Image: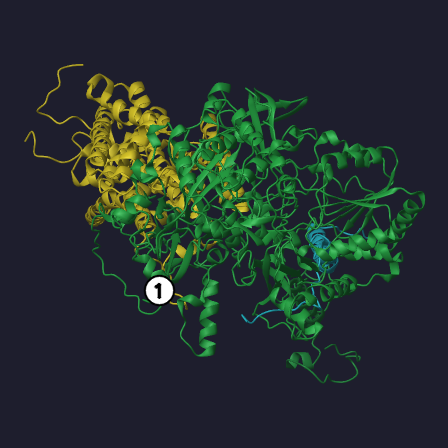
Amino acid sequence: MSVVDHTKELSVVEGKPALRSLDDLISKPLETKPDKKFFIALSITLSMMGLFVIGLGLTFWYGVGMWGNNNPVGWAFDIVNFVFWVGIGHAGTLISAILFLFRQKWRTGIARFAEGMTIFAVMTALLFPLIHVGRPWLDGWLMPYPNQHGLWVNFTSPLLWDVFAVSTYFIVSLIFWYVGLIPDFATLRERTSTKIKKAVYSTFSLGWRFSNRHWQHYEMVYLILAGFATPLVLSVHTIVSFDFAVSILPGWHTTIFPPYFVAGAVFSGFAMVQNVLIFVRKIFNYEHIITLDTLEKMNKIMLVTGSMVGYAYAMEFFIAWYSGVQPEQFTFLNRAFGPYAWAYWIMVSCNVITPQLFWFKKIRRSIPIMFVVAVFVNVGMWFERFVIVVTSLSRDYLPSSWAYYTPTYVDFMILIGSFGFFFTWILLFTKALPVVSIAEVKAVVDDAQPSHKGH
Amino acid sequence: MNDNRNSNDMKKDFWKSIKDYNDDPEVLEVKANEFMEGVTDDFDESKLSGISRRKFIALLSASTAFAATACTDYRDKGEIVPYNKRPEEILTGKANYYASTCTGCSQSCGILVKTREGRPIKIDGNPDHPINNGKTCAKGQASILNLYDPERLKYPMIQGRRSDWKNVDQEIISQLNDSKKLNKEISIVTGTLVSPAMKKLFDDFTSQYPNTKVYQIGLVSDQIRREAWLESYGSYDYPAIKFEEATIILSLDSDFLGNEGSFIENMQKYTKKREVIDKVSFNRLYVAEGRMSVTGAMADYRISISPDLQYQFVLMLMGELIKSGSAINLSNDILSKINSVSGDLKIDKTKVAHLLKDLNSNRGKSIIYAGDTLSNDVHVAVNLLNEILGNTTLYDYSSSFKSLMHYAKAEELSQLVDSMNNDKVGVVIHLDSNPVFTLPADFGYESALKKVTATISLTEAVNETSTLCKYALPINNQLESWGDANYRSSVYSLQQPVIAPIFDTRQKEAVMLTWISGEPSTYKDDVYHKYLMSYFNNSAYSKRNRLSDEKSFWYSALHDGVISYEEEIQRSSFRLNSFINTKQDFQSNGYTVHLTESYFVGDGRFANNGWLHEVPHPINKITWDNYASISPALAKELNVEMNDLIEISSEGKTLTLPVLVQPGMADKTINIELGYGRTVVGDVGNNVGFNAIGLMTKNYSSSPFVNNNVSISKVNGKHKLVSTQEHHSLDDTFVKDFHRIRKIIQEGTVEEYNNDPHFLHHEKHEVFGITREHKYTGVKWAMSIDLNKCTSCTACITSCNVENNIPVVGKDQVERGREMHWMRLDRYYSGTPEDPIISNQPMLCQHCDNAPCENVCPVNATNHSPDGLNQMAYNRCVGTRYCSNNCPYKVRRYNFFDFRDHFEDEYYQNNLTALINNPEVTVRSRGVMEKCTFCVQRIMEARSDAIAEGRELKGADVVTACQQACPTNAIVFGDANDPESRISKLRKHNLAYHVLEELNIKPNVTYIAKLRNTHPEEN
Amino acid sequence: MEIKKYSRKSFVSKVGKSTFYTALASVLPIKFLSSKNFIRNRVDIHIHPYAVKRNNKV
């Protein structure tokens, strides 16, 4: 590598491609028939999703008893999966909204895809509260609707706040994503040949004319939506963490949860986004748009949030000891040395140790290694939720009610199936919508913006 | 309309235009081709559908109507049809109570049966009965399920094929007459006989068929005690013990508080001297045993000793105590015999020293009580020891344990088997007995039975004996039967049916009466009713000063259920010779197997009762199984842990079963409960547990239940024992003594309390809240549980199960931790594995004022009532389980499945068992959370009664199911806002504490700390 | 002689009509035949005619 000129910003898009070529490149997957590799991938994710359907079918038919949940472990895989998927969704919004407000141009290559992942992750997550209830046909009761009994939901319950937070998150993310797509729909509308596609793109592009006025409105709306979405990144997972923090269980009842969970969410979200992007940029030849620099920056964020998570682990232990409350102290010792110690040490090694590798530039910039690290991070983050939910419930205040939790095959079917569900949507997304934001990327190509330099 | 007239005839009547009027050919042409070219080419009138518009609409509406009739709501469970003509006795919605007697075991406790709309739904104790005083045991509570067992025998069977009574009676009568003619024996094998009317029936039967011999058998009974008493005092009847006057009690392998004899009565008497509430009055309990029993868990001092060493132990005590004198003159023979026994018993010397000191200083106020399973020699020795100490003042002869006939000895039974084998027996009648299961295999009963031509089994449900009998005759359940009981002197109780027999069953006595009469057609439904009434008039009526006529007396006796009268069994003096004849047990250096009766399955008769299998063992919390309990040291020696299989063999008989490590057991003792391992009982109970009767022999040396000629070895394989509590070794410091550290169990000693009544509250810190507290004006329900009196008998839990329609979930679901009991008995160990201290704690919904479960339910399904109850609205619950997660006591129970559907393929989901449900309590669906409601249905009933009568509801009006069942009245329930009520005084007691008080959730269940009466100099 | 035209339209209409009538006619027979699976074993219970109740605490 040549000496880097630190007075100039790194090129976001490498190589200064012609703007038209970007159009062609990004629209290419939408204009070609899916190839064999796509169908193979789709068949894999569809079969995983098939497991999901079967698992859910068994659960609906026989009851939640098909899972491993018991007394006292009332929540297990169901809530662990819920928190896991909601967490993954946070990366997208952070990239789309927060990095936008921070004017980080490098987000443009990845924002669309990340935001799409958010939406699909939130969809997957939303399934879990709906199916984990004992009587899913009454899920509507979780919504506050007026009725003749004058009966409202319980607004003091964190699960209710979840309902509001996650549905708000879904709606705002969807709107934000959609607004960003409008210019791209228009681009596609101009390029398309078939009648149906033209009709669809015309509808969705809402009559975008590429006029100046349209762009002005667009920029303003986008800014406002980014402003809306930003607090959601922090608040949604905070509220999800309240499911635990508001309870009285040792191991759950701690004020560090909101920032800890948010950091963890960003951490796992970025890891998942990074994993998928590595595939996307290779398959679709977006390597000069989703550059190695971008990936490196994402890794740096992972390092920061991973360190925050590691700090939170240490702080939990310290405060438990410092509090002098025996149940609290025992909960943490139990996590490390009790029957679930195996889960705990997986979590610590994956979440605390592996991201520290990102201190080294060589590792940060090496695609195979960073991929593996991100996989470990995801595994570790799943186990973190498992450790928090299951170990705290399994051994709480009264030793007479302690019990060990073992998942059943239906639990695993639903876990694997949720990944299938998620990835199916992503695969379909790659073929239906542009995975990179055409308009935004074109805007950050070198010399794309008019400037006074050189005059 | 076509005009058929010739258009040329005249001008047309109907025309549309002038052209038409003039029959213009153009118009005609247009008319002919009214429709476009080719459109009507296919038109053919004959091809038109026959359905007119009218018909089509008619069909449409008819099919909709049909479709509507085909629709049924999946929730449609059938119709509820109200009475057309209401029976006089029934007021819909109001329960009727009937007094009767329980026949679950031989103790014959008086019961009150609660019926709704003609069907019994709950059994509770009869408060008028002087023995059990309104209380029942767990078996009595759950026995109601046997009435509604779908696998009950419903009709008589010959060779396994359905028949009818007329045929059966005819054949049997002819068989009986044949035996009479051929001089063959007619054997009646019966369980413990407590009914004097039935005894008279046997006499009548014997006079009709002179070759009748009656054999009374029982798997675990007081036979040994009676035989010893007979030797010592010349009487087969023995007195009750005045435990309430005993200051020192020494129990030798006697579970007198748990499962032995009249344990409900014993518990009541015992706890009279474990008082901390109104006064402090304490006895001191020493238990010397090999296994860990409920009584052992209650002990102030527990000495681990193998059951085959008890004789030496008693003699050692005797030897020490006679040094300070004896209340009975001892001859030199006796003295030398006492001193002849030697050997180091290897037991705790400090405790023995305490024991000797106490027994010495409490002569005449103490009692030594030996267990039913110990040998004759031990019982005689104990009789002598009590005489020496002058403890005979505690023998209550006015309330003796009577017997109507003697138990058959092993020799008699062997002779019966020989007769059966040699064709000397013509008819064998089994009356509610199961000797193929309960007799040790080496009697050879099973093969002998097959040789007899007429084998009859009169039984409620199929069992191992009835399947081998030619005639299996179904008898009425206890709730459908007439009967009486005179098991205790001075108490005569009556049994009356509360429901007409549901199936084609008959009263067993009535069946025998028909056989006596020799003519099947003499049977009438009330034949035994009349017989009983006439017996009653001839006996009980005459025993009392009566001011009324016979019939009124009979009705009032049935109304009360019990008659007390004066009767005292003759006292006699101790026969010293009986002691001379005792001998030391064969001492083994190996292992000793101690077989004891199951706590809940009895002798196996309740093996098909799902509630009784599922209720956890009082000490080790195992369900749906039995096992070999061994000490931690023995487990280490054999290198086994819980669930590993071991093989026990004794004189050619082997038994393979799983191991349970039980802290506190004597090192080489193995304890196995009897009554399990039945093979023919029903879908619920078949092959549950392991049959340890195989280790019993008819040729026992001292006691049939103590076998010290065994060897054990580890074998491959495991059998998962399912427990409701995790088992941790007492050595595991990681989890040791949390119940003490977390102040879940707070205990002290009597000495500590006497010195400083406030000792419990010194370390308490102030807990304050930051939210506005609710004011509770009016009634506020609260409960208190006195841990001094709780023995873990589990009657409360069984009563709650019956009252609140708790489903049975089965072994696999209990393994997953999904048992549905609203109340549980927690058992905590502290101390060492060799000498553990056991603490019990009933745990139920604490109905917290600041309930953590209430504010986390997203749909508001659980909330608080103005009278202090934490309520659960089943129909609103969507089942997120957050409330259970947030409950620190983990008392909430979730319906993971529709358990009525899920257990044993809908075994309990049938029209018969559905009748047991309490109509006042919702039957919960799948996915719904449930928990203890403080019997809100009883509160509501009391409240509506109060409103109807125009008075205030008082706390004392409501009795919860658990409170009603608790034999020692450890549970107190009432209005905390009433300053006069017992509960409000208990809440302020010095020993009162709450579990997890520091969480500030303000529970409303107060626990009274347990005091152990240890020697003051120890502290 | 005219060969009867068997068009798709008439085939569909025949099939539709026959399904409709079969469904209509079979509602009651299916209900009757499937009633065996919903066995409703009535259990007749009666209070015992000679039972003496006690509802007063005296």
Rendered residue at 77%/61% (across/down): B528
> At 45% across and 65% down in the image, what residue appears?
B958
| Front residue (pair B540, A368) | B540
> In the image, A194: left or right of A356?
right
B445 vs B248: above or below: above
The answer to whether residue B925 shows anywhere in this view is no
Chain in yellow, by letter, is: A
| Secondary structure state at the residue bearing disc 1 | loop
B266 lies left or right of B235: left
Q: Position of residue A260 (x, y in %)?
A: 24, 37
Chain drawn in cyan: C
Q: Which residue is the site of mark 1? A: B780
Q: Relative to B10, does residue B537 appear above or below in the rendering?
A: above
Q: From this viewpoint, which residue is outermost toward the left?
A: A455
Q: Position of residue B572 (x, y in %)?
A: 61, 47
- Farthest-out residue, top: A1
Q: Which image quarter is the N terminus of chain B in?
A: bottom right
Quarter of the image with the C terminus of chain B in it: top left
Residue A424: quadrant of the picture: top left
Of the pair B819 and B50, the residue shown nearer to us = B819
| Mark 1 crowdedness (10 Å alpha carbons): few <14, some 14-19, many ≥20 | some
> Is residue B614 among the parts visible in the rendering?
yes
Horizontal side of A341 relative to B968 (left or right) equals left
B274 vs B471, nearest the viewer: B274
Q: Inspect the image, locate mark 1, and give the three-letter code of the amino acid beneath it.
A: Lys
Which residue is depicted at the point 46% across and 37% down? B325
Q: Quadrant of residue A192?
A: top left
Q: Residue furthest right?
A: B181
Observer-nearest of B712 and B405:
B405
Determine the colour of chain B. Answer: green
Q: Position of residue B113 (x, y in %)?
A: 60, 61
